Image: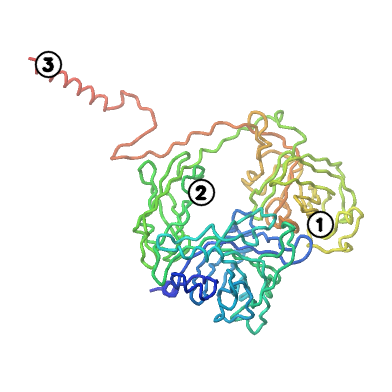
């Protein structure tokens, strides 16, 4: 038996769930099991330290590819939890994930019920009776990131949803999700990237520093709790406190690591294994927009499964006919919770498919799936093909421009396509030049909020480093970056021969004076590499007459290009809510494209019982079945005449 399996078996035998912090007497009146084990899914969010301006509580943008759809502000995490409802003490694991290009994970993750947090020390024997009625938990872990091991992290969590739901957890109802309270980070950026109610949510309460002597058992968090009264930047003014607990050491000192548990799935109750279940699929059930070229066909279970059993029982069919392919785990090894089906041939557009897995699929512990799982999805229609038209039909020819915001990975985040600009053709050649020779404007909101660009200066070839702490009045006065009252993150603009550079202040929503730099090629297409021109934000404004769209390969009078060695168009921002993102402006498209009907793509011939179903017309005179039919009719006529005689 592998070490990994022995460890998981041990955890199942010791599995536990979070204590009801309603007092020991109240817990004794509940007919709950003593121990539960769970796998979990959740979100990791790193909030910036307390401070002023744009720092307090603002989320860091994870530039790694595993950051989820919330623009990189949150990162998906998974792991396990175990807790004893009698003692109120438990432990957990957080699976490794990627944060800012490096691996992050947790070790020695322990937590305990603390009622309302009024206890004065960390003696577990006092909980929950000594803390008063309440639903708080105190967690401590040693956090690893990159080459730094054992960063002390403490968290104060609200487990209201978990405590209220645990009594209903059973082998037939093992999932806890969509209940509880809103995490503190739910309100970041005016609740623009909400998680919703979760079973175990991070709070804004901070802990008392335990001191170095206690770091091994309680990394930094001791009782009593301290209320966080900081008003975070970008939050509703009525809200105070930054989610998480400031870290006392490591590369993120003062930052606040938030771990919110959005879904708990019971894997054991009092040591007895709960049958595994399917938790998510890709494409989702009833989806009608799956791209057959890029959408992975995946199935995720509530716990690790035996690879061979999933591979043997997973099927994909269309019209009752099987689709050939292979099933592979998403992590190396014999056991994995997520599997991907890779078809031998590309799936067809506008086609219905059925995926299923039977009860022959078993967990790592040998427990079969409680019931077969089947879901249906339909692939998207074939994409529209564009044919380019002469420049005489360009909407707003000679004036309209494009704004494309790229993520740290270079994908289009959003933008607008009614951008107007003026430039008198002059440039600056010093960082404190006061030649504000360009304007950029648009009436279309960006990502739901109005925006403006102001105090724009064009720059000649050269390298310029700006202090993002300089205010607009200081820029207008020609103040040297080193002499500005505040020192912000440096932003460097490098302009090569034949190019034009620009520095502007960008206002979006309630955030003012975000520093944005751009480098433009003149009379060139917008592209940061082969095929990447299609990442341009095309948006609805380019709809134009007769379905016109901007030609992705069009020439622009000024075309934004990569301003750093990362190869992504634009220059990453270093302040404001879009740190790491790149704002690209392109002016005056030369031509557009007209939508045309897509080419018809035929699915491969499908063989049924030795016959081939073909879409190719065949002459009746080339088909032998016609001659067989004529022969049969002739024989039937002869037979009827013979009977009459």
Q: Secondary structure at mark 3?
A: helix
Q: Residue at x 82, y 60 (%)?
A: 469
Q: How far, Cα to Cα, is label 1 from label 2? A: 42 Å
Give the CA distance from mark 3 to mark 1. 103 Å
Where in the figure is residue 630, as x and y percent of width and height?
23, 22
Which residue is found at the position 68% from the left and 29% from the top?
A: 390
Residue 322 visible in the current orientation: yes
Q: Crowding near pointer 2: few (<14 within 10 Å), some, many (20+)?
A: few
Marks 3 and 1, the one that precedes in the sequence: 1
Judging by the rendered image, the residue that carries numbered circle 3 is 641
Q: Tally the marks.
A: 3
Nearest to the eye among marks 1 and 2: give it: 2
Helix, strand or loop status at disc 1: strand
Tell me the quarter of the image containing the C terminus.
top left
Q: In the image, is 337 to the left or to the right of 192?
A: left
Q: Which residue is mark 1?
A: 463
Ranked by sequence position, the earlier of labels 2 and 3 is 2
Q: Which residue is mark 2?
A: 295
- C-alpha span from label 2 to label 3: 65 Å
């Amino acid at each position: 038996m592998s070490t990994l399996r022995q460890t998981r078996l041990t955890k199942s035998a010791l599995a536990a769930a979070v204590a009801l912090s309603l007092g020991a007497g109240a817990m004794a009146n509940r007919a709950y099991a003593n121990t539960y084990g769970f796998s979990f899914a959740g979100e990791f969010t790193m909030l910036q330290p307390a401070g002023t301006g744009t720092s307090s509580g603002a989320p860091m943008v994870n530039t790694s590819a595993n950051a989820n759809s919330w623009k990189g502000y949150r990162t998906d995490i998974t792991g396990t939890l175990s807790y004893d409802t009698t003692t109120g003490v438990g432990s957990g694991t957080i699976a490794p994930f990627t944060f800012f290009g490096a691996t992050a994970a947790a070790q020695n993750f322990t937590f305990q019920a603390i009622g309302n947090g009024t206890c004065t020390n960390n003696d577990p024997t006092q909980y929950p009776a000594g803390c008063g009625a309440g639903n708080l938990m105190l967690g401590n872990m040693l956090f690893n990131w990159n080459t730094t091991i054992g960063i002390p992290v403490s968290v104060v969590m609200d487990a209201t949803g978990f405590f209220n739901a645990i009594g209903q957890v059973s082998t037939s109802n093992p999932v806890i999700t969509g209940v509880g309270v809103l995490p503190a980070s739910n309100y970041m950026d005016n609740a623009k990237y909400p998680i919703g109610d979760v079973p175990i949510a991070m709070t804004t309460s901070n802990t008392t520093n335990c001191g170095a002597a206690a770091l091994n058992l309680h990394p930094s968090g001791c009782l009593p709790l301290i209320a966080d009264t900081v008003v975070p930047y970008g939050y509703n003014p009525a809200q105070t406190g930054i989610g998480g607990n400031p870290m006392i050491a490591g590369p993120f000192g003062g930052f606040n690591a938030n771990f919110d548990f959005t879904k708990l799935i019971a894997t054991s109750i009092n040591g007895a294994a709960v049958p595994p279940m399917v938790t998510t699929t890709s494409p989702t059930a009833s989806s009608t927009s799956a791209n057959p070229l890029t959408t992975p066909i995946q199935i995720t279970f509530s716990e690790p499964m035996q690879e061979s059993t999933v591979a043997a029982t997973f099927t994909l069919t269309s019209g009752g006919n099987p689709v050939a392919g292979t099933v592979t785990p998403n992590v190396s090894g014999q056991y994995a919770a997520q599997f991907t089906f890779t078809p031998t041939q590309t799936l067809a557009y506008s086609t219905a498919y059925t995926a299923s897995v039977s009860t022959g699929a078993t967990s790592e512990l040998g427990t079969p799936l409680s019931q077969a799982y089947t879901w249906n999805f339909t692939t998207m229609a074939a994409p529209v093909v564009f044919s380019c038209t002469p420049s005489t039909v360009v909407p707003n020819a000679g004036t309209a421009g494009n704004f494309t915001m790229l993520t740290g990975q270079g994908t289009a985040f959003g933008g607008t396509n009614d951008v107007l600009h003026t430039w008198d053709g002059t440039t600056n050649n010093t960082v404190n030049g006061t030649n504000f020779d360009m304007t950029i404007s648009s009436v279309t909101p960006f990502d739901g909020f109005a925006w403006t660009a102001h105090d724009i200066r064009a720059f000649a070839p050269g390298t310029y480093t700006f202090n993002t702490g300089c205010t607009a009045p200081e820029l207008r006065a020609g103040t040297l970056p080193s002499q500005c009252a505040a020192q912000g993150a440096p932003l460097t603009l490098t302009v090569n021969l034949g190019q034009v550079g620009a520095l502007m202040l960008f206002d979006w929503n309630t955030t003012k004076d975000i520093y944005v730099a751009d480098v433009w090629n003149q009379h060139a297409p917008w592209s940061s590499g082969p095929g990447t021109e299609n990442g341009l934000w095309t948006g609805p404004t380019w709809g134009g007459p007769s379905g016109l769209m901007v030609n992705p390969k069009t020439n622009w009078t000024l075309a934004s290009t990569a301003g750093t060695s990362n190869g992504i168009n634009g220059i990453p921002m270093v302040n404001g809510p879009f740190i790491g993102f790149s704002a690209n402006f392109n002016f005056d498209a030369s031509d557009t494209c007209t939508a045309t009907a897509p080419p018809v793509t035929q699915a491969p011939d499908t063989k049924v019982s030795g016959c081939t179903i073909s879409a190719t017309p065949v002459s009746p005179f080339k088909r032998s079945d016609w001659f067989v039919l004529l022969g049969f009719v002739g024989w039937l006529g002869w037979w009827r005449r013979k009977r009459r005689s």
